[in-house]
Image (spheres, rainbow, N blue to C red):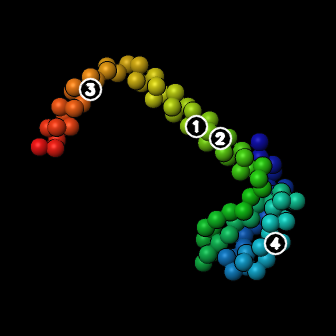
Amino acid sequence: MYKSADEHEGGHVSVSEARETFADIVNRVAYRNERVLVTRRGKPIAAIIPMEQVEFLERAEDEYDLRMADEALKELEHTPAIHWEQVEAELDRRRA
């Protein structure tokens, strides 16, 4: 799915350099498909990546969320129901 490292050379820029050259960085990302890590004191703190990669990450997150929801629903199928009266009694007990 990801392209080889040669096609994503973006590199690293400091926060101050990113501030000064933001338009250039955005163009490199958008038109040359680069990834740029923004650093502070030499440590990466953010990334500027092409929209295609953002969309890929969002799809992956959606798939993960659906998988987790499916697992939770399957778990509920094997969990006995709790009657509202029991819940209400437990809440009253905890309030007292």
Circle 1: residue type: Tyr
Tell me which corner region of the image, top left, top right, bottom left or bottom right, holds residue 31.
Answer: bottom right
Circle 4: residue type: Ala
- Residue density around tag 2, few if under 14, some if 14–19, many if 20 or more, within 10 Å: few
Question: Where is residue 62 drawn, in percent x and y?
Answer: 62, 39
Q: Nearer the viewer, mark 4 or mark 1?
A: 4
Q: Residue at x 56, y 37 (%)?
A: 65
Q: What whole-number distance in Å separates the C-alpha atoms at marks 3 and 1? A: 31 Å
Dot placed on the residue nearer the N-terminal end, 2 or 3: 2
Depth order, front residue of 37/66: 66
| Mark 3 residue element | helix
- Residue density around tag 1, few if under 14, some if 14–19, many if 20 or more, within 10 Å: few
Dot placed on the residue nearer the N-terminal end, 3 or 1: 1
Quarter containing the N terminus: top right
Q: What whole-number distance in Å separates the C-alpha atoms at marks 4 and 1? A: 34 Å
**Which numbered circle lies on residue 84?**
3
| Mark 4 residue element | helix
Q: Nearer the viewer, mark 3 or mark 4?
A: 3
- Residue density around tag 3, few if under 14, some if 14–19, many if 20 or more, within 10 Å: few
Circle 2: residue type: Ala
Q: Is residue 5 left or right of residue 93?
A: right
Q: What whole-number distance in Å separates the C-alpha atoms at marks 3 and 4? A: 58 Å
- Residue density around tag 4, few if under 14, some if 14–19, many if 20 or more, within 10 Å: few
